[in-house]
Image (spheres, rainbow, N blue to C red):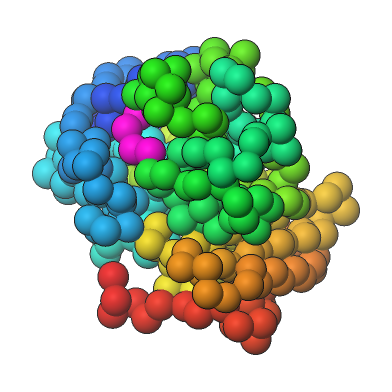
Amino acid sequence: MTASNTPPRIVIATRESRLALWQAEHVKALLQARGHTVALLGMTTQGDQILDRSLSKVGGKGLFVKELEVALEEGRADVAVHSLKDVPMELPEGFALACVMEREDPRDAFVSPKFASIDALPQGAVVGTSSLRRQVLLQALRPDLKIEPLRGNLDTRLRKLDEGQYDAIVLAAAGLKRLGLASRIRATFDATAMLPAAGQGALGIEVRSNRHDLIDALAPLAHQPTWLTVAAERAVSRAMGGSCSMPLAAHGLLDDDGTLQLDAAWGDPEGQAPLVRAQAQAPVSTLAQAEALGNAVAERLRAGGARGVSPAGH
């Protein structure tokens, strides 16, 4: 990289939740270690403000991303750091995912002050989650449980649990670990029993697609095995018309010889249809191959009875 195309100062747009700030600070430290001057621009998004309704009812995960994209468009910020599972499957015209970083633990965590695991919960126990994916997977594991909505940032969710509003809650293990809260994890769900969301545990960095200087600067932070894996996962979701209003899980495992095994599950939040699972594996060394595998798994889900949504429905 020549000095001429090195950005003089990189401004990172970030949500102001504790986890989002941790993620932005993490990227800032890595870029500073490579000699860049970096600043943060903290922002409150619509997704952070609307806490009385589930995301699927008010516009989906994109509510956490939109304001950050406006800051990039207006030149107030250069890059946005996202939890990849919050990033819509289709980015708006003029935006690109410049970098996917090495993944933290992608699994879901069982968090409860009283009970050691989901199996230890009594009949009819109240479990908090606002994720339709977690809801259908929990219902498949324990149909007797009462699943109640749970919104807010990580600290808010833990406070609601500690106040006794729930017997247990389900959170991403990655967020708890990043914030030094791993001690709150009573059990980690097996990733095959409780399939994670596409991209869970991975960080993605978004830029304007014409900012080649930034794309070059971010390239050393990318982790290709993670990028290939999450590209396949996100392709399943994209092919199904995926948004967070869809109860869909997709999780890939890339082995040392370059074979990617991709598992996916779809459930009916109304409980009217059984959980549909699909799986495929293939050698993967390019994003195009990863996406082709994701599309193949989506086809198998559909063949098994899973219902996608049309993109027009978003």
Percent x, y of residue 25: 40, 19
Judged left or right of residue 135, residue 160 is left
Q: In which quarter of the image is residue 112?
A: top right
* Image point (58%, 27%), residue name: 111
Q: In this view, does 100 lie above or below 246?
A: above
Looking at the image, is 271 positioned above or below residue 164? below
23 versus 127 height, above or below: above
Image spot of residue 103 (x, y percent):
61, 37
The segment highlighted magenta reads 150-154
Number of numbered discs on residues: 0
Is 254 placed left or right of 94 in the picture? right
Residue 254 picture location, percent across and down: 77, 52
Image quadrant containing the C terminus:
bottom left
Residue 85 on image: x %, y %: 47, 48
**Residue 49 sits in which quadrant?**
top left
> In the current view of this chain or complex, which residue is farthest to the front?
123
Q: Main secondary structure of the magenta part?
A: loop
Left/right of residue 4 with respect to residue 180 in the rendered view:
left
* Residue at horizontal 60 percent and vertical 51 percent from the top: 144
Magenta segment includes 38: no
Q: Give above or below for 55 relative to 272.
A: above
Question: Which residue is at the far right?
Answer: 257
Q: Which residue lies furthest to the left in this view?
A: 74
- Residue drawn at the location 44% of the way across and 18% of the way down: 162
Residue at 38% of width from left, 24% of height from top?
160
